[in-house]
Image (tube, rainbow, N blue to C red):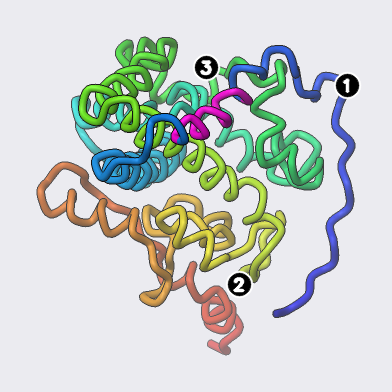
Amino acid sequence: MRRYPKPSTIHRTPEEHVNWPASVPFLLVHLLPLLAVFTGVTTTALVLFAVTFFGRMWLVTAGYHRYFSHRAYRMGRIPQFLMAFGAETSAQKGVLWWASHHRNHHQYSDTERDLHSPRKGFWWSHVGWILCDKYKGYEPDRIRDFQKFPELVFISKHDWIPTWSLGIACFLIGGWSGLVVGFFASTVLLWHTTFLVNSAAHVFGRRRYDTDDTSRNSLIIALLTGGEGWHNNHHHYQASARQGFFWWEIDTTYYGLKVLSWLGIVKDLRKPPDRVRYPERASDDVLEPA
């Protein structure tokens, strides 16, 4: 693997620190899956675990990220709301909060103004910044294109509704085992798998494109997150709904979006043009004599 110089450290501001007392509920959720010792692990709970993990991973990556953060495709108002509702079952806060902060990350990636750069610390980029009071709110002006929809403002403000709805559904379907394993264990795994894109995908892997940040491509992270691990590709061309730029780069989130496009639910899926995938060819074209 090609070696790259270790990026310099960025010191966090005095406001960038974990509020430990306020973080207690988040930390306690990590212990709830241990209750499986008492509830047991049923077949129904395991099925719920798989469905809620992979289903919500797709909703987070296709919805929160590729649609609400980057507008890499189009869809109608009703599918848009359903996508937001489904993504919020992940317990990763409101859709407008998520997308607003992600846009900040791309605008200031790996600089002092990047809210979760690994240059401020690996664990800070992974989870610390979420537990910081400084980032509890979001900037409405950064997400004005979706802020204009009252239903999105409502569901973003009341993000507990989708999460609790799924938790209750898991309990009704699978009992206590369904709640503990199918919901809480799935949620904790979902959190830390998606968080890897902010942390590990800026530290481990290969860099195909010379971007102004530390983004990297990782097959392992891509397999875990439905294609989000092709992070250097993404930072090179953020507008693409397809982050696996080449056929061998597995991108299951894009495959799902492609199926929805055949059904007419999503439209105008953006893909990287050849000039983006092969920037060296574009440079050669420019240098060719007239």
In the image, which residues are magenta?
Answer: 27-36
Asked whether 221 or 134 is in front, the reply is: 221
| Image marks 2 and 1: residues in contact by CB distance under 8 Å | no
Closer to the chain start, of discs 3 and 2, is: 3
Left or right of 19 on screen, residue 14? right
Q: Position of residue 144 (x, y in %)?
A: 45, 21
> Label 2 vs label 1: CA separation?
35 Å
Query: Number of numbered discs present?
Result: 3
> Label 3 vs label 2: CA separation?
34 Å
| Image marks 3 and 2: residues in contact by CB distance under 8 Å | no
Which three-letter amino acid code belongs to the residue tagged 3? Pro
Determine whether the residue tagged by mark 1 lies in a helix, strand or loop. Answer: loop
Determine whether the residue tagged by mark 2 lies in a helix, strand or loop. Answer: loop
Residue bearing the label numbered 1? 14
Residue bearing the label numbered 3? 140
Question: Predominant secondary structure in magenta?
Answer: helix
Determine whether the residue tagged by mark 3 lies in a helix, strand or loop. Answer: helix
Closer to the chain start, of discs 3 and 1, is: 1
Crowding near pointer 3: few (<14 within 10 Å), some, many (20+)?
some
Quadrant of the image occupied by residue 1:
bottom right
In the current view of this chain or complex, which residue is farthest to the front? 38
Left or right of 83 on screen, residue 61? right
Which three-letter amino acid code belongs to the residue tagged 1? Pro
